[in-house]
Structures are given as C-alpha cells and as structure tokens.
Amino acid sequence: MSITMIGLDTAKSVFQVHAVDAAGNAVIRRKIQRKDLITFFEKQEKCTVVMEACGAAHHWGRTLTGLGHDVKLIAPEAVKPYVKKGKKNDAADAAAICAAAVRPDVKFVPIKTVEQQAILALHAARSLLEKQKTALANSIRGLATEFGLTVPKGVENIEGLVVEVQADESLPVELRQAVKEAHEQFLEANGHIEKLEKKIVHHARTDDTARRLATIPGIGPITASLIAASVVDISAFKSARHFAAWLGLVPRQHSTAGKTRLGRITKAGNSEIRRMLVLGATSMIRHAGQWNSAAGAWFRSILERCPARLATVALANKNARIAWALMTRNEIYRPSGNGAAAAKAAA
C-alpha cells in the first residue's frame, strides 16, 4: 500500500524513518545517512512528514516542503507518551512520532523562516555572551575578594575594581595579571554584545510586529524582536492564556475532588522569552509611581500586597497576554496617563 505518513527522527548524521500506510501499518523502518536523506524523499510519493520540533527540524521542514511533502513539526513532549516503555531508541522515537501525529487533539509547531531563525541566532549569541560576561565579572570579583577588595553589586562597578587592583602594587603580580586577562575578555564580550544588540534593535525597528510589541510598558526592543522572531503564527494560540501558558507564566494546577489549587508558575515553553518578560517587568518597579494608567494602578496594588518578584511575574504574565492581543489584532498598545512615558523609559 502507498505511504501516507513518515515519522522522521532527526540526528546529526543518521536519521530514522518510520513510514505507515492509511491503515497505520508500518511500511518502512530503516536508518538513512544524512547524505542519502534528500534522495530518499525525492523518490517517495508526496505524503505527510512529521518531525519533532527541535534542533535542525525547521531546516529540514523547509527542505522537504520544497520537495512537495506536507511537513509538520510536533512538540517533543507530545511524542514522549507514545514511546514504548523500555524501548527508547531511534526506531521507537520515529514510530512514536507517527502515533502522536494522528491524535485528534495534537497541535503542530509552525515552521520558522530562514529570516526568523537568523534573528534568533543573534539572540542566542547575545544570551551566551551575556552569560560569559556575567561569569567573567563574578570571576574578577572573586579574585579581588580573596585579597580584601570589594565593590557594590552591579556590572558598572567592575571597571573601578579593576583599576583599584592594578593600582595597588602591594598585590601579587600574578593576581593583577589574572584580573587583567579576565577584564580583557570581559571588555571583548561586552563589545560583541553591543554589536549584536545594534542588529537586534534594527530588526525591532523595521519589523511591524516588533514595533507594535515595543509599545507595551516593560517590553523593550530586545524582547519585542525575540517574540516577533519566535512566534510564527499567533493564531496557533486560541487565547491570551494559551500564549501565556506556552511561555510558562501561568500557575501550576494541583486539582482534585473539585478543588482547584494553584501553585508556582509552570516555567514551561520558551524560557528565553519568559526571562526577558520578567526582566522587563522588573524594570517597571522603579517607574511604578509615575505609571498613571489602569495597568500602573494594578501593578502598584500588586506591589503593595505581594513580594516584588511575585509582582514582576504577574506583570510579565499580563504583558504576555497583551502581546497576544496586539499580534492577533495588529494593533499598538494605547496607555493612558504617563504609561507611554514609563514604557519609553523602561525600553
């Protein structure tokens, strides 16, 4: 019988194919080398190809779509329940992909364009360099602390600490050399970050979706660019809550016997967008007093009743839902009072 669906388990060099017919019977089970994958699919009749949405899946999705196949990406967590217990291998994974793809409630992940992945590459590089910069700053602080030199928190105080270390000739030469090397790496990482941020900000100012998102108080150009590049099709989320849940910003539920108990946020989904939304919400704390709008009044009331971290997560959740509304309706955020000024200051 003819093949109707192919489950493709991707890897670096060896791919596992599990092809089924209309009745769900396995027709092909085989491994294929990377160099032979295109040839294999060129010989196949047009069918549905399903892959887990991870790694280079978007690249292969675009490639196989170009060959005429209907390519669908499925979230890995949707596939995991269909992997046979005790049989975790490539063949079992490919079969589980097919089993999960035919479920009536399955949700597929849109394939990103080359342009979107390119922007996300800038964000990934920036995030990595930010981590390295923080690690280098902490290293400099640690080395100086061992010899009794400390400065207040904040990356802006690292320069003064380095100057102090280099000026104190009573300190060992080895220490001053170690601090100098770490500081040079710190400055180099910071320079690369600034270059990447310029490109990201340019994208935020030229992309229609990113420009709309940047009007939300607590969402700057970096976050706006990240959301615009990450979300391929906002209609995939039925509601604002679904979008917030995808970002892991909704409470975890522990419900039984008709009683609903809400816990901490799930932290599921896109961790980088969630982190940036929380950071942006944190920056709004210092502007809360001048944020004269309904949202500002709501945020101040949360700050009065709850710890600051809980309030910032609540604002991040709210901003995620506002972002969904703006992307769905193609509108901009229209604050009242000084909301616009607060948003500009936070950006």
Image (tube, rainbow, N blue to C red):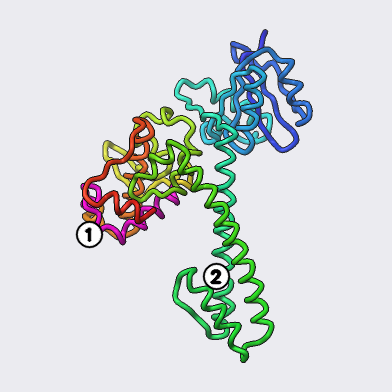
Figure quadrant of residue 213: top left
User: Which residue sits at x=69%, y=82%?
Assistant: 174
Amino acid carrying label 2: it is Asn
Place of residue 36 in the rendered image (x, y in percent of width and height, measured from the top left): 78, 26
Q: Secondary structure at mark 1?
A: helix
The residue that label 2 is drawn on is 138
**Residue 314 marker:** none
Q: Is residue 147 above or below residue 255?
A: below
- The answer to if 286 sits in the magenta stretch is yes
Residue indicated by mark 1: 304
Depth check: 35 or 192 in front?
Answer: 192
| Element on which disc 2 rests | helix
- 131 and 22: which one is in front? 131
Residue 196 pos. (x, y %):
56, 52
Residues 80 and 50: in front is 50
Horizontal arrangement in the rendering, residue 291 relative to residue 250 (left or right): left
Residue 324, given in percent of the width and then of the height, sits at 37, 36
Q: Dot 1, how many residues are within 10 Å of its Cα: few (below 14), some (14-19), or many (20+)?
A: few
Q: Is residue 249 left or right of residue 86?
A: left
Q: Residue at x 55, y 57 (%)?
A: 194
The residues colored magenta run: 274-298
Give the residue drawn at x 62%, y 63%: 188
Tell me the kind of residue under disc 1.
Glu
